[in-house]
Image (cartoon, rainbow, N blue to C red):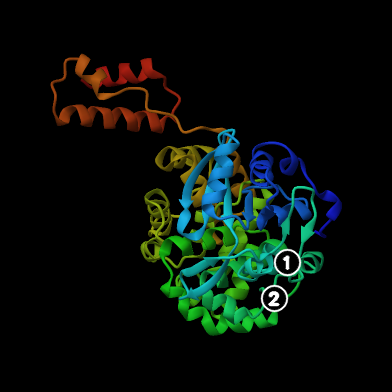
Amino acid sequence: MKPDLQRLPQSWMTEGPAAEVMRALTAEGDEARFVGGCVRDALVGRTIRDIDIATPLSPQRVTELLHKAGLKAVPTGIDHGTITAIADKTGVEVTTLRRDIETDGRRAKVEFTDNWQADAARRDLTINALSADATGKVHDYFGGLDDLAAARVRFVGDPKQRIVEDYLRLLRFFRFHADYASGALDDAAVAAAKELAPNLKSLSGERLRQETLRLLTARRGTDVWGEMLGLGVVQHYLPWATSLDRLRWVAELEQRHGLTPDPIRRLAALTMTGCGREVAETLKLSRAEGDRIIALDATRDAFDAASAQAVRRQIYAWGNDGARDRLLLDWLDRIDAAAGSAALAVIESWPRPRFPIKGADIVKMGVPEGPRIGELLEKAESWWIERDFTPDRAACLVFARNQV
């Protein structure tokens, strides 16, 4: 994963929405650069996701130049100098260079500057403090290129100071180490993280959620989570997420069977039985995410992988996604390899069916509205399930009519 300056400039820097925004900002001789993750990932050949641009120009001047170029400017973070430029229906964030003048571990008060190094100095990690102009010239004030070359993740300047400015940086350090590093954790960063980990509880659940879920699906996320447990970091904000063996096994199964790493499934693998609700509340999971982890964490029968018919019944009960989750979570100590693989093959190839008749069909048979309709439907559905979901609508209607 060595940085290659020959990879720059790339097409997104010279054509398309980001290039259009860059041309608008520099049309009258002003300076602007691509910054942060897009530069880092371009240098190591990774897919570019979000594109950010920085400039010494004030937000008002940025807006003026964008409008002159016929582009829309949305003041998405005007207090912190951020304007979202819209080009070809694509948003590109443009932020005025800043320096922190006051921080409290959760948010910062900033003032604008025209000093590129001062702006880079307020960023968290050296590999995130890189910037590049449209020609591909890279500016590196804190050794980010060397750290990329060494597959090393370090804070800009003093780790403790960086973390105190925003405690979420503590988790970001581990997440980036899991995604970009290959060696040992930086000693200075570890010392600061151990000391300041109790402050993670002061952060909002929404911010903790984002970093935690991204960490769990990072390239070496399972190993780094284990290191965080060993250092006592996790326990300060998520003391229920300690089942490391199950997490490793689920991650291995996902990789072995070509499944997309799933952060909620991995979080459920970590969670102690009966603590799903606490995890969901602490991380402020969405309604769907919270319901899912609570259901997976609840006391339940083990997944039945004894036969294809048993697997199909569970697919019908929980859906394909729910059945897959339960299979992977139970596989470690309850299911052998052959049965697990066969069950997974059924889950991937057999979509959950819909019961082919409804209450309206029973009404048409002359049954009046009332509980009798539900009873007949339930009886017909049980008959259909017992026959492995093979009877079609006509057969189900005949069965129900005979019960009437």
- The residue at which mark 2 appears reads as 185
Taking 276 as reference, is 19 above or below it?
Answer: above
205 to the left or right of 137:
left
Q: Is residue 370 left or right of residue 147?
A: left
The vertical placement of 202 against 385, above or below, is below
The residue closer to the viewer here, 256 or 229, is: 229
The Cα atoms of the two marked residues, 2 and 1, are separated by: 8 Å
* Residue toward you, 361 or 289: 289
Report x, y in % for residue 183: 76, 72
Location of residue 65 in the rendering, given as x and y in whole percent from the top left corner: 59, 43
Residue bearing mark 1: 181
Identify the residue at horizontal 77%, vertical 69% (top origin).
147
Residue 305 appears anywhere in the view: no
Which mark is on residue 327? none
Answer yes or no: do the residues labelled 2 and 1 have beta carbons within 8 Å?
Answer: yes
Q: Quadrant of the C terminus?
A: top left
Q: Residues within 10 Å of mark 1 (few under 14, many from 20)?
A: many
26 on left or right of 167: right
- Quick one: SS at disc 1? loop
Amino acid carrying label 2: it is Leu
- In this rendering, the answer to whether 16 lies above or below 46 is above
The N terminus lies in quadrant: bottom right
Q: Position of residue 41 (x, y in %)?
A: 72, 54
Decide if residue 83 is in sight here: yes
Q: Secondary structure at mark 2?
A: loop
Location of residue 376 by image quarter: top left
Left or right: 365 as drawn, with respect to 195: left
Q: Residues within 10 Å of mark 2 (few under 14, many from 20)?
A: some
Q: Residue 276: give x, y in percent of width and height.
A: 40, 62
Who's the residue at 48% across and 37% down the image? 312
